[in-house]
Amino acid sequence: MKKLLLFLFISIMSLSDYYGAIAINRDTGATGYSYDYSSQSSAERAALNYCGQNCEVAIWYKNTCAAVAYSYQNGTYGWAWGSDARSNERKALANCTGNDCQVVSSVCTTRYY
């Protein structure tokens, strides 16, 4: 019994967290995203790299999904995170201040709740 409990404890502890991020350029609406990275900082760096110049991290997430909506009219954006991608998209649109907001990125890590 002790061996089984030890095995279960080690198995649970070995489950890795998966990080992701979405970066955005407020001037153009260009985005870059990452998922399944081993740390927040590496996920953010990857998203910024994929986004290009003049980008900022809009949101980072761990073991879940995230979405970003962008207004091309005024350069604002809204974001949301959670386990349901469609719900995140609706929330990101609701959090975006502009009449022309569109979902520009929606992504999940492999392991999400």
Image: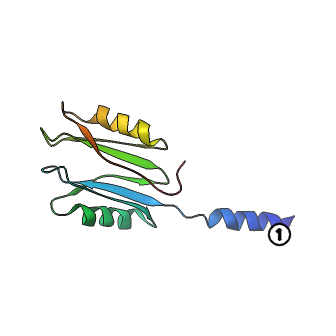
Q: Is residue 42 above or below residue 20?
A: below
Whole-percent x, y for residue 33 in the image: 33, 58
Whole-percent x, y for residue 12 in the image: 66, 62
Disc 1 residue type (three-letter): Lys
Q: Residue at x 36, y 35 (%)?
A: 91
Taking the image as shown, residue 27 lies to the left or right of residue 2, namely left
Q: Residue at x 87, y 64 (%)?
A: 1
Whole-percent x, y for residue 30 in the image: 20, 54
Whole-percent x, y for residue 70 in the image: 23, 42
Farthest residue in the right direction? 1
Q: Residue at x 60, y 63 (%)?
A: 15
Q: Is residue 12 above or below residue 99?
A: below
Q: Residues within 10 Å of mark 1 (few under 14, many from 20)?
A: few
Taking the image as shown, residue 15 lies to the left or right of residue 74, namely right
Q: Dividing the picture into quarters, in which one does residue 56 lie? A: bottom left
**Residue bearing mark 1:** 3
Q: Dividing the picture into quarters, in which one does residue 16 lie? A: bottom right
Q: Dividing the picture into quarters, in which one does residue 86 lie? A: top left
Q: Secondary structure at mark 1?
A: helix
Q: Residue at x 19, y 41 (%)?
A: 76
